[in-house]
Image: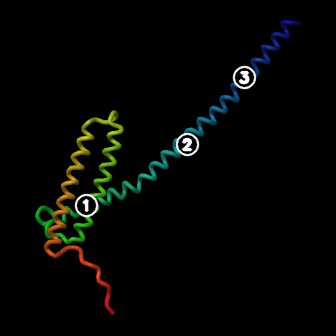
Amino acid sequence: MTTVRALADTRNVALDTAEVIDSVSSGLLIIGCTAVAFTAFLCAVDYWSSKPSYQHLGRTLAQSSVFWARWPGDRIWSAPFGELSREAARCEEILVHLQERKEADEKMSYARPPDSRIYFYGQIATRQSMLATVHSAMNYAISQGRGPQPHQPYRT
């Protein structure tokens, strides 16, 4: 009788273990699916939240390129003050973006080659010199009487 009882107890333990493993595996499957779905959600949010900023940056860079194509070299000194002030704002915006990218690159410097830092330093120096040129042209336009015009109310 004791052998039968020992076999019955062993069978009960085996069945209990199988039930526990079955419930644990379904629980792990649920947790795994939830983790994958949450990760996919976070990636989608990151992608869709950064997309408009890259579109705006691309538009800003294109407008800046058009400005420099329209007013190359010495012609910048005859550019209208309004265009100069808009280009100064664009240069400052691009500089802010480049500074942010450089700081992010420095935080992850272990994963990137040193050439990327050299690239950011070169781009920042170029944009700073472009901004200084635009500011000089703005000052020249003001000295020539082509500066910002005060807004005069309409007369009736």
Secondary structure beneath dot 1 equals: helix
Q: Amino acid at mark 3?
A: Ala
Q: Amino acid at mark 1?
A: Ser
Image height check: is 135 above or below 23?
Answer: below
Q: CA distance from mark 1 to mark 3?
A: 68 Å
Q: Dot 2: few (<14), some (14–19), or many (≥20) neighbours within 10 Å?
A: few
Residue wearing tag 3? 18
- Of marks 3 and 2, the one in the foreground: 2
Pinpoint residue 120: horizontal percent, then vertical percent: 26, 45
Q: Amino acid at mark 2?
A: Phe
Pinpoint residue 83: horizontal percent, then vertical percent: 23, 69
Secondary structure beneath dot 2 equals: helix
Residue wearing tag 1? 64
Label whose residue precedes the other's in the sequence (1 or 2): 2
Label whose residue precedes the other's in the sequence (1 or 3): 3
Quadrant for the C terminus, please.
bottom left
Tell me, for residue 104, which label it has, or none: none
Label whose residue precedes the other's in the sequence (3 or 2): 3
Residue wearing tag 2? 38
Is residue 19 rendered to the left or right of residue 57? right
